[in-house]
Image (cartoon, rainbow, N blue to C red):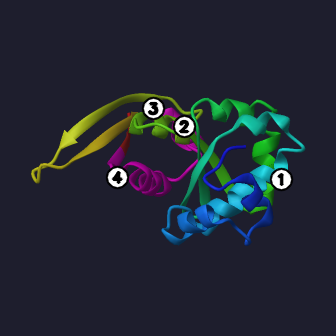
Amino acid sequence: MKSPLCTICLKNYPLVCGNCQEKISEGEISELDIKVARVLVNLEDLFPSIKEVTFKQVFVADGVYVVLVGKGDVRRILGSGRRVLRQLEEELGAKVRLVEESRDPQKILRDLIRPVRILGINTIWLPDNSFERKVRISERERDNIPLTLEQLNNVIYEMTGERIRIVFD
């Protein structure tokens, strides 16, 4: 598994090399990032499919861990019948959502609310020259959203810096 810390430092944490220590000192890597990366590295022996996974970062929204991974890596993790995800949730003691790295807030939102489909996304321009995204979801799928609306708003803002408003049609 690829991560911001080298594999040797992940296995021997808190003993880390100078390069990894610099990343930790500068705040590039948090303690939570290290914790999740260590769990994933330990799961490599049980699930060889995650050896190719690129771990980027973890975001927390009201007790839910949102794990940011490289492009195409969600399929690698979920491909083993969700056993990796269940094991990760068990080890961390929290609900985990997987999101592929993307600059597109719509793609991130789709990953967060999977399996719920988005009907449409509109941009609302506000009087102060800022904007927010209005996300339309079917009223019938309201109960299928895996996170609360507050959790979604917090995670999207933390990951992309954009505000969203979810409405049900």
Nearer mark to the viewer, of 1 and 2: 1
Nearer mark to the viewer, of 4 and 1: 1
* Residue bearing mark 4: 161
Residue type highlighted by circle 1: Asn
Q: Give the percent coordinates (x, y) of residue 31.
A: 62, 68
Residue type highlighted by circle 4: Gly
Q: Give the percent coordinates (x, y) of residue 34.
A: 66, 62
Q: CA distance from mark 1 to mark 2?
A: 25 Å
Q: Earlier in the sequence, mark 1 or mark 2?
A: 1
Identify the image quadrant of the N terminus: top right
Q: What residue lies at 44% left-to-right and 51% top-to-bottom? A: 159
Nearer mark to the viewer, of 4 and 2: 4
* Residue bearing mark 2: 111
- Please provide the residue range marked out in magenta: 139-165
Nearer mark to the viewer, of 4 and 3: 4
Name the disc covering residue 138, or none: 3
Front in this rendered view, residue 99 or 23: 23
Q: Residue furthest right?
A: 46
Q: CA distance from mark 4 to mark 1?
A: 32 Å
Q: What residue lies at 54% left-to-right and 37% top-to-bottom? A: 111
- Name the secondary structure under disc 4: loop
Q: Earlier in the sequence, mark 1 or mark 3?
A: 1
Identify the image quadrant of the C terminus: top left
Q: Give the percent coordinates (x, y) of residue 43.
A: 83, 48
Q: Is residue 134 left or right of residue 15?
A: left
